[in-house]
Amino acid sequence: MTHMFFILTVALYACATAAYLACLVRTSPLLTRWAGRILVVGFTAHLLSTIHLANKLKYLPLTNLQESLSFFSLAIVSCFIYFERRYKVTTLGSFIVPVALLMLVASSSLHAEVRQLPPILQSNWFWFHALLAFTSYACFTIAAGVAVMYLIQRYFLKTKHFGALFQKLPSLETMDEISYRCLTVGFPLLTVAIISGSIWSEQAMGSYWVWDRKETWSLIIWLIYATLLHGRLTIGWRGKRAAILSILGFIVVLFTFFAMKHSIIW
């Protein structure tokens, strides 16, 4: 059942990706509606696959790279659906949904056997920490996608290139607002995730902070987004500088996620 839902999810995400990319070429209310509907059905299948696997394992599937990639993809799509409906930014799907699809395809290429949960992960603090971390990373993914769109639209305005893509992208003000909203949601979640991770570390290893590689890089991510949020609130950072820093933060998130996969969490 889990495999069936997973394959269906990959197929639906692929169709949704094609539909959203097509929206960049041809504006059509019907195509836009169907892109959203296919993605929602795909998300539902993905959620059912995750729930079925969790029921089979008797714990949330977040303990290895394969499971984490799938859950990261699920979190990204969940956040995107919210922001798409909240701000009516269909074009954002052309930049976000392919990322979710690639993560799911990467997950399907990995193999992870069902195993007994290690004692170090048998803590409610771990699950709380992991859920918050993935949700914050999903918000930062949306922010990075918006940042790429912002830089493209800014280039069009600067060069006075008002072509078809310019007409399809949201205004700079709308994109700036979405980016700020992602930051104000993602950063507090990341902060609480790090705190809860420290409590979990103390329970599991007797120390709140062991300077594990993933802990160190998580702190670096926190500092990057803390700098961005501080700059926006106190100095008024907007536009190109904030967009570039948001993309940089997401690159560090991906580096931490993949390069530190052998840490104490994964």
Image: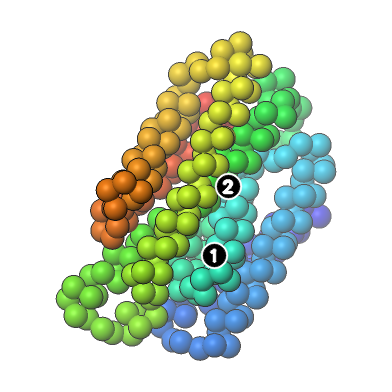
Q: Which mark is residue 142?
A: none
Count residues near mark 2 (Cα–Cα under 10 Å), then give few for <14, some for 14-19, many for 20+. many
Q: Residue furthest left?
A: 159
Image quarter (top left, top right, bottom left or bottom right) of the C terminus: top right
Query: Given the image, on which type of amino acid does mark 2 rest?
Result: Thr
Q: Which mark is residue 83?
A: 1
Residue 44 higher or lower than 206, as above or below: below
Number of dots carrying numbers: 2
Quarter of the image holding residue 153? bottom left
- The residue located at (43%, 30%) in the rendering is 219
Pointers 1 and 2 in contact (CB under 8 A)? no
- The residue located at (57%, 58%) in the rendering is 79
- The residue located at (35%, 83%) in the rendering is 167
- The residue located at (61%, 22%) in the rendering is 199
Q: Position of residue 77 (x, y in %)?
A: 58, 60
Q: Is residue 142 left or right of residue 107?
A: left
Mark pair 1, 2: CA separation: 14 Å
Query: Given the image, on which type of amino acid does mark 1 rest?
Result: Phe
Quarter of the image holding residue 264? top right
Residue 3 visible here: no
Residue 114 higher or lower than 18, as above or below: above
Q: Which mark is residue 135?
A: 2
User: Looking at this view, is 196 or 110 the one in front?
Assistant: 196
